[in-house]
Amino acid sequence: MPMETKTLIGKDVPRTDGRAKATGQAIYADDIKLPGMLYGKLLRSPLPHARILSIDTRRAAAMPGVRCVITGQDIPRVTYGNWRLFPGTQDEYALAMDKVRFIGDEVAAVAAVDRETAQAAIEQIYVEYEELPGVFDVDASLATGAPVVHDTSPTNISIDRKIAYGDIEAGFAASDYVREDTFTVHAVSHAYMEPCACVAQSDLDGRITLWTSTQTPYIVQCLLASTMNMRENDIRVIKPAVGGGFGGKMELRPWEFCAAFMARKTGRPVKFTLTREEELAFGRRRHPMTIHSKVGFKNDGTLVAKDLHIYLDGGAYNAMGPTATFLSGNFGAMLYRYPSYRYLGEHVYTNKPPASAMRGFGAPQTLFAAETQMNIAAEELGIDPIQIRLKNAMVSGDELPGVATISSCGFVESLKEVRRISGWSRKRKNLKTGRGVGIGCYSFISGGVFNWFNTQYPFSAAEVRAFDDGTVHLLSMASDIGQGSDTVLKQILAETLGLKMEDIRLTAADTAMTPQADLGTWGSRVTLMAGNAVLDAANKIKERLAGAVSARYNLNVIFDIEFADGRVYAAGKPDRGMTFGEAVAFVQKTQRGEPLVARGSYTPRGKGLVSPAFSFGAQVAEVTVDTDTGQIQVEKMWTAHDCGTVLNPMAVEGQLEGSVQMGLGYALSEQFVMDGGKTLNTTFLDYKMPNAADMPPGESVCIDTFEPEGPMGAKEAGEGLASPTAPAIAEAVFHATGYRCKDLPITPEKVLKGLGKL
Amino acid sequence: MPAAQFDYIAPTTVDEAVAALVNGGKDTRVMAGGTDLIVKIRHRMLFPTCIVNLKRIAGLDAISVDKKNGLTIGATALLADVAANKGIRRHYPTVAEAAGATANVQVRNMGTVVGNLCNASPSADNAPTLMAMGATVDIAGPSGGRSMPLDQFFQGPGVTALETGEIVIAVRVPPPPAGSGTAYHSLSQRGKLDCSAVGVGTMIVLNDDQCTDARIIVGACAPVPMRTRAAEKMLIGKRMTDTLIRQAAQTASEETSPITDVRASASYRWKMVAVLAIRALTDARQMALRKSTSK
């Protein structure tokens, strides 16, 4: 890359929505109030598995203030699911038709003049169930003669995925050391700060506008259209400010359907707002998995073969489980060079709240297993854990046969940097009981390539409208759900056009107003894909403006045209140029008033099946373990990671800190306490998410790499870091105590049992 | 959840509050900080018809530390004020620590020590230390005032000895005896800001190195914060050696009857009572020795 001076890229540009959020002025879905608006409430199944024999809604419907009551019998019999490319995987109805499959499955909905009436009406709906035996874990679900959750999947396995390359049998035969382990990981909550909410309005033509707390307005638009038997263009989905998603808000949800359906039926807007208890008891979760992993090494630590078999406990519906099944196989082969590799992933139905996408999308689970096994192998082969990783680390240009090519990779540098900043070599020699350090690593995708939604549009798109007052209007369907992508997209555009942040007006995530289309916020795709679309549109604008300046000053065609400080001018001759606004006016004149508008798009092509780019990183945790109580105190975290060009260091740091907080909960304290299909801890008092006081101090280094496929060299920065924290802490606990955890979370009770004290 | 419907009364004297309670009937609830009450209403665990807020009663938030009469904490004194009070920190440090370890900053700025006691949760962080120090509660009611030792106040989870129309107006702690030491240790799965899964509070009195009095109270391991009297007996009249502390802690553990719930298993709680009792007794002994040497 030529040396360029950047004014906004690589700078700590504050979030453009920061002030509005800090002062309470940002509008979230639940803040929206429309004239005549009704309040919706869902009746949910109290049983984990049952046939619905009858539903009596007469008393509820007759209550004063109740405007609408609906059940499965009132709605189109159309299933939905995100894997539209494979309709057989679409296994959900907005309201249960004849069976309920988990405690919380939506059975009926009410719209009433206020929340109190809606709640009272819900309690007046009588459902007669025939209870069926349920299955609550993978073993029970796969047992012979087990109850069948969906008739379409008699084995309870809804989908599987296989990957195989290299000669695995020969690989194990040639190994000096073969290690086989089974790891189990648990479900955790996204615990986004904003519980789900939506408001639907039907206009005089019967078209629907839906404001909803979502990560994927386009997916919601399409699936709402199909489930309502409407045309896509008759549905408008608007994403207001969203208080986090982490994968939990990327599907069509029953309340969105019910709000739209009842708004159409009543002619009045309908709002749904979920409670935290509903979110924790019935909401989407991270997949629990049972992971069987067999790896073969040479005595010198060289990896030879890996055989990975994963059961994903999917809960009652597929949700985003197929993608997690697909991706887990890829994450299992990342980070290191595996000459031979075999993967079988099986997605299993159980009578529990559905698991779905959650920050890491299969990686936190698979990498906990892979990284812990790597640490075990290092221990048994007598090699330092960082040394064994360096020996096998992926590098730029590596290929996963038939799957992906790694175009940029700063993994080796990450390992060396984290070793340096953490004082690893010195700390690893400390054998004082109760204190230890451990390492975990990650690799992650920058958006997905596989088009399971079967979109007919580009993966991301942008429109830029330039004005003669020196401002531009950016339109993009990309969804900022709190991660800061609005700020980053504006940075990319402002930097490219030589404008200031405040020169850019942004309209985002409104399916009727922004260019078709964008697949949404998941898989760390927004910066790379929407960023590339913005860059594409911006470059088209630049081309036009450069032409204007070239014509106005009669420049030799070899001149470069610079865009900086709100001006457009010949490189090296600043006087031969004009303001950005003047240049726009010039172009507009040449078009006899037609505005200067450009569209850009991005769809990954020729990048394999998985992702256009991969990020890498390594993390070291230092812990103190109280060997009498089993309590673990994380003293410090060190991180070195490669996310390509750092577009906004402050935003990357925020992502890192959030990841550590989430990883800490996953490793140590968060879990659902279940009694069969019933979730017992449904408040933050008993769902133990770490809070500010629990956060350890940290230190981090960003490795300088340039991703050719990313906008200005950038790639994923928000999601991969959800993975290394748990294996790093688990290894540190082993280093401190000799207790090796293969079954998350690492609770005090497990530590004491592991030490033979309980 | 839908908003509950109830009357709200904010009296300015204790007599008015008592009258409001008597008139309101059995579904009337007293509120100080509301940090437990409002949550229970929102979660539809309580359906009060009337709420009587004590916070407008002048002087009820008083904290006084007196050499002769000991410590008095008024019914509406905030957890945060108790935790920060200089006199309490100097003369009743464990009382301040327990208040400071209750819940989080927001709750401590709204909630009260007396409210924490009246909520009668077996895991209430303030109960063990206050019980160990021989605290009593002052009660106002329709038939006048009375007071009662705190260790008779708790009857079961969420249940106290209060009769209809009665209000706790203060908790009193006698002056710490010469040679006494106190400590409170608690733990939970989440490191900080959490509801305790186990807590142990203690006060011991040393004469030279002889233990002349001891109280050990265990939280969250029985329907009420409980005294482990057999363990206390083992200490009294003896030299408080490490071995004796370990034996007494083991006995304390055996006296409790913890259950398995979402916060911890029974077997873990049993084990932890012993661990925390060792730590609390050791700290209390150290405080007692430090006080006697600094005389």
Image (tube, rainbow, N blue to C red):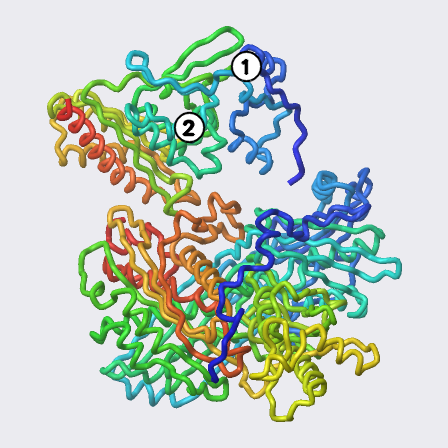
Q: Residue A536, how many percent across, how many down?
A: 64, 80
Q: Residue B212, how many percent across, how many down?
A: 17, 20
- Residue at 39 percent across and 71 percent down: it is A617
Farthest residue, direction top: B143
State whether residue A753 is above or below residue A121. Answer: below
Same-chain check, marks 2 and 1: yes
* Element assignment for label 2: helix
Residue placed under numbered mark 1 in the picture: B165
Q: Residue A564, how many percent across, how many down?
A: 59, 75
Q: In the picture, residue A255 is in which quadrant?
A: bottom right
Residue situated in front as seen by the camera: A170 or A509: A509
Residue situated in front as seen by the camera: B18 or A254: B18
Query: Label 2 amino acid?
Result: Asp
Residue placed under numbered mark 2 in the picture: B81
Q: In the picture, residue A521 is in which quadrant?
A: bottom right
Q: Is residue A462 visible?
A: yes
Mark 1: few/some/many CA within 10 Å (<14, 14-19, 20+):
many
Instruction: Work out whether mark 2 precedes mark 1 in sequence or the reverse, and give the earlier one.
Output: 2
* Element assignment for label 1: loop
Q: Is residue A89 visible?
A: no
Query: Label 1 amino acid?
Result: Gly
Q: Residue A421, how many percent across, how many down?
A: 29, 66
